[in-house]
C-alpha cells in the first residue's frame, strides 16, 4: 500500500514538471510571434510612408492654350523632383470629369514619392469661369503656372490647330479672316480671340487666389532661350536648382530647342512649330490695335510688360 502511494506521488510530480515545460515553451513562442508581428507592422508603416503613390497635384499649368504649355511641362519634367501627368486631364473644366470626384482626379496623376511634386497641365482651365473656385476647393495652397505669348500669335496658332484637325478629318473650315472680321471689323465673338484676352480671364483667378500663387511664364522667351524662364519657375515652385543650360540644344531643322537628359534627347511632337495659317497685313494691323488696351490692362495686373505686336 505504501509503495502504491509513493508511485502515485512520483507520477504526479513528473506530470507537473512536463506541464511546466510545455507552458514555458508556449509563452516563448507567443512572445516571439508578437515581436515579429510588431516588427512587421513597423516595417510596413515605414514602407507605406516612403512608397510611391498617386497624389493630387501641388502645381498646375492652367494655360494659356497654344501658349507653350506642353513645352513648359516637358521642360519642368527634367527636374528629378517633378513628376507630371502625361495627358491633359480636364478635370475642373469638364462637368463629366468633375462629377467623378477627387479620387478619380487623383487616379489620373503619376506615382510620386514623398517630397516629389506632382504637376498637371490643362490649358483649358485658364478661360473657364468655374475653374478657379474648384481648384481652390481642391487645394488653396496649390501653385499655378500661366504661360503666355503674344495674343495675336496665340490666336493665329489656335486657328491653325483647329484648321489642321478639320483638314485631317476631311472637313471644311472657313479662312481665318472670315471668322475674325465682320463687316471689316474685328468680331469680338470669335472664341479664339476671346481666349487671348488675358486680363479678363486672369481677373477671375485673382478673385480667388492671391497674386503670389500665380507665376507668369514668358512663352516667347521660353522658345528663344528656355533656361532663364525655367530657373524662375524652379524658384516659384520651391524646387532646388537642378535644370541646367546643358539640358537643351537648338534643333535647326525644327527651329526650336529640344531636351537632353541622361544622354537621351527629346523634341516636342511635329505639331509644335507648324507653319501658321496666312493672315493679311491689314487684318494683322487691326488685331494689334484691338489688343492694345487689353494688353496694357494685363501688364498692369501682373506688374510687367512684354513686347507684343
Image (tube, grey):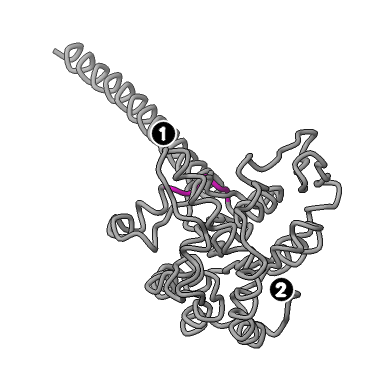
Residue 58 can be seen, yes or no: no
Residue 242 at x, y percent in the picture: 78, 54
Please state, as top left, top right, bottom left or bottom right, where the C terminus lies in the image: bottom right
Q: Which residues are magenta?
A: 108-113
Occupied quadrant, residue 135: bottom left
Q: Secondary structure at mark 1?
A: helix
Residue at the location (76% across, 33% down)?
A: 264
- Vertical placement of residue 308 versus 177, above or below: below
Residue at the location (46% across, 80% down)?
A: 204
Residue at the location (58% across, 58% down)?
A: 66
Tell me which label, 2 or 1, sits earlier in the chain. 1
Nearest the eye: 177 or 121? 177
- Vertical placement of residue 42 versus 91, above or below: above
Nearest the eye: 214 or 3? 214
- Vertical placement of residue 12 versus 28, above or below: above
Side of 123 relative to 31 (left or right): right
Q: Residues within 10 Å of mark 1 (few under 14, many from 20)?
A: few
The residue pinned by badge 2 equals: 308
User: In the image, which disc is placed on residue 33?
Assistant: 1
Nearest the eye: 150 or 25? 150
Residue at the location (36% across, 58% down)?
A: 102
Q: Residue furthest right?
A: 246
Residue 293 at x, y percent in the picture: 61, 86
Residue 193 can be seen, yes or no: yes
In magenta stretch: residue 152: no
* CA gap, disc 2 and disc 1: 72 Å
Residue 295 at x, y percent in the picture: 63, 81
User: In the image, which disc is placed on residue 216?
Assistant: none
Side of 89 relative to 94 (left or right): right
Please state, as top left, top right, bottom left or bottom right, where the N terminus lies in the image: top left
Amino acid at each position: 500500500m505504501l509503495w502504491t502511494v509513493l508511485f502515485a506521488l512520483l507520477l504526479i510530480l513528473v506530470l507537473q514538471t512536463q506541464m511546466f515545460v510545455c507552458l514555458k515553451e508556449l509563452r516563448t513562442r507567443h512572445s516571439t510571434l508578437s515581436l515579429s508581428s510588431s516588427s512587421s507592422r513597423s516595417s510596413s508603416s515605414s514602407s507605406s510612408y516612403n512608397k510611391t503613390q498617386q497624389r493630387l497635384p501641388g502645381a498646375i499649368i492652367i494655360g494659356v492654350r497654344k501658349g507653350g504649355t506642353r513645352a513648359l511641362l516637358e521642360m519642368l519634367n527634367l527636374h528629378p523632383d517633378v513628376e507630371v501627368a502625361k495627358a491633359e486631364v480636364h478635370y475642373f473644366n469638364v462637368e463629366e470629369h468633375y462629377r467623378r470626384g477627387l479620387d478619380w482626379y487623383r487616379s489620373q496623376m503619376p506615382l510620386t514619392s514623398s517630397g516629389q511634386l506632382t504637376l498637371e497641365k490643362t490649358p483649358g482651365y485658364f478661360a473657364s469661369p468655374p475653374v478657379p473656385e474648384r481648384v481652390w476647393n481642391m487645394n488653396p495652397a496649390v501653385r499655378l503656372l500661366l504661360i503666355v505669348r503674344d495674343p495675336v500669335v496665340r490666336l493665329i496658332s489656335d486657328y491653325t490647330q483647329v484648321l489642321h484637325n478639320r483638314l485631317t478629318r476631311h472637313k471644311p473650315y472657313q479662312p481665318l479672316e472670315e471668322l475674325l472680321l465682320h463687316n471689316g471689323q474685328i468680331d469680338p465673338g470669335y472664341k479664339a480671340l476671346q481666349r487671348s484676352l488675358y486680363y479678363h480671364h486672369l481677373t477671375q483667378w485673382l478673385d480667388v487666389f492671391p497674386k503670389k500663387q500665380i507665376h507668369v511664364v514668358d512663352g516667347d522667351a521660353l522658345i528663344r532661350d528656355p533656361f532663364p524662364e525655367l530657373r524662375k519657375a524652379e524658384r516659384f515652385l520651391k524646387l532646388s536648382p537642378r535644370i541646367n543650360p546643358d539640358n537643351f540644344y537648338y534643333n535647326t531643322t525644327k527651329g526650336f530647342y529640344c531636351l537632353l537628359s541622361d544622354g537621351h534627347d527629346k523634341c516636342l511632337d511635329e505639331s509644335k512649330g507648324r507653319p501658321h495659317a496666312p493672315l493679311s497685313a491689314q487684318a494683322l494691323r487691326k488685331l494689334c490695335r484691338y489688343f492694345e488696351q487689353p494688353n496694357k490692362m494685363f501688364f498692369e495686373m501682373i506688374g510687367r510688360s512684354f513686347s507684343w505686336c
